[in-house]
Image (cartoon, rainbow, N blue to C red):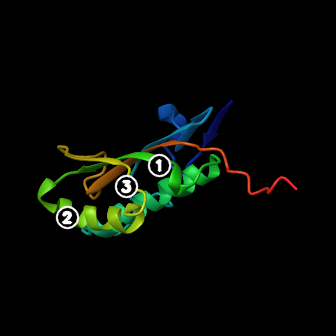
């Protein structure tokens, strides 16, 4: 089974990407930038951009049939690694109970200079446990 989840990016067709791709029980979410309706959001705010990107990623995971508990790895890419604590705060608010593998890296820049962060998320969808008592 392969399921693709789209985004509202005008670049999706020309680049040839999906917000997320699910094959079997595995979901991979593309690099997610702080964009809404083609515009950068939360300019200058690492915390808010990170939280926004991760929330978009979680929505894509859910659209692909997973949930936040299925997240096994996150990647936080920053243009200024000295601001990692701001990104970490947003990550912790969403994932402190789940504790996926997580990497913070610094990169030179993104496509848009106003983007301070991009995130990636990987999941393995676990089957729902039966709540049947067998009666």
Q: Which residue is mark 3?
A: 99
User: Quick check: 39 left or right of 81?
Assistant: right
Q: Which mark is residue 85?
A: 2
Q: Which residue is mark 1?
A: 71
User: Mark 1–mark 3 contact, CB under 8 Å?
Assistant: no
Q: CA distance from mark 1 to mark 2?
A: 21 Å
Residue 135 on image: x %, y %: 88, 56
User: Mark 1–mark 2 contact, CB under 8 Å?
Assistant: no
Residue 99 on image: x %, y %: 37, 55
Q: Earlier in the sequence, mark 3 or mark 2?
A: 2
Secondary structure found at label 3: loop
Would you call the spot at circle 3 few (<14 residues within 10 Å), some (14-19), or many (20 or more)? some
Question: Please, is residue 35 above or below residue 30 in the view?
Answer: below
User: Quick check: 65 left or right of 123?
Assistant: right
Report the front residue among 33 and 38.
33
Which marked residue is nearer to the observer: mark 3 or mark 2?
3
Residue that appears at 60% across and 54% down: 62
């Amino acid at each position: 089974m392969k399921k693709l989840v789209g985004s509202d990016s005008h670049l999706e067709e020309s680049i040839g990407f999906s917000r997320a791709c699910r094959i079997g029980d595995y979901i991979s979410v593309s690099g997610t930038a702080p964009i809404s309706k083609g515009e950068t959001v939360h300019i200058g705010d690492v915390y808010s951009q990170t939280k926004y990107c991760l929330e978009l990623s979680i929505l894509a995971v859910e659209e692909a049939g997973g949930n936040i508990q299925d997240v096994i790895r996150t990647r936080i890419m920053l243009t200024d690694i000295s601001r990692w604590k701001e990104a970490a705060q947003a990550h912790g608010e969403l994932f402190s109970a789940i504790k996926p593998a997580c990497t913070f890296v610094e990169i030179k820049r993104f496509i848009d200079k106003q983007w301070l962060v991009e995130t990636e998320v990987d999941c393995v969808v676990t089957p729902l446990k039966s709540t049947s008592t067998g009666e």
